[in-house]
Amino acid sequence: MSGTPALWLPESALLDARTAEPVARCVQAWAGEWFAAARPDLPPRWERQQTVSPAMGFASAYEGRGLRLSLRDEGRLTLAAQLLGRELGERDLRMARDRTVIEHLVGAALDALAAMLRAAIPANSGDDDATAFVLPVYAPTGELLLRIEAGCGLLAALALRWAGSPRKGAALASRKSAFAPQNLRLSARIGTSRLALAQIEALGPGDVLTLDTPLTAALDALIDDAPAATGALTLMPGDGDFQLQLTRPATQW
């Protein structure tokens, strides 16, 4: 399996008229070089297609890089008529040589269209199954000439081409500068004592509680009641205030 994720965009972007424009432009340029009759007609955008079974008569004339050209047998005769600029009937197919010439002409024209499409579609369009979307190509008389079928990967690559690269936003501010004005409560936990409920109810003025912290033990420094660092407790000379001397800088908490 490939490690490259498939391109994805919402269907509204895939079916945008700008996604069909590069392929339609190729078809019109190809018709300008090969058609003796009027230019073909195409819908303005790709269409979501239903599953096409082989019984419907469509055969693949080219397939590669997420794209397929397909047409019916009668479509080959219609396409040959557009290439030659005149109607073709049974009398034009009486000889095997005539059928060979027409078949060669149609094949060469389709090869030329496939080459133009390969040059126009993005190289990163993927190799997904070209069965999801279709762009039908009609003769000016309304007859279906051929179908250009494409997969989601190709349409996503075409849509990304007209959408352009994502706009670069301003860099996010440092978390430190965002948090710097916040007020936090720094406290020290001197120790705890565990008593039964009956002992607590019996406490009175003058009782002494024994804490579980030895005098020489490091004390916890807390930020909003969450332990963050350790330190040693000292007594400020002169005014009787306590001090907590930290053992690590705040950047290491």
Image (cartoon, rainbow, N blue to C red):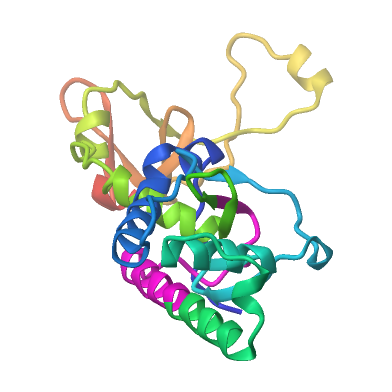
Residue reaching furthest to the bottom: 97
Please name the residue shown 54% across and 72% down the image.
Answer: 127
User: Would residue 123 be found to the left or right of residue 141 on screen?
Assistant: left
| Residue 5 can be seen in this image | no
Magenta range? 109-135
Q: Position of residue 33 (x, y in %)?
A: 29, 65
245 is higher (above) or lower (below) than 103:
above
- From the viewer's side, name the closer residue of 112 and 5: 112
| The N terminus lies in quadrant | bottom right
| Residue 228 can be seen in this image | yes
Please name the residue shown 55% across and 81% down the image.
Answer: 103
Please name the residue shown 36% across and 50% down the image.
Answer: 160
- From the viewer's side, name the closer residue of 113 and 189: 113
Residue reaching furthest to the left: 238
Q: Position of residue 230 (x, y in %)?
A: 38, 47
Please name the residue shown 70% across and 33% down the image.
Answer: 194
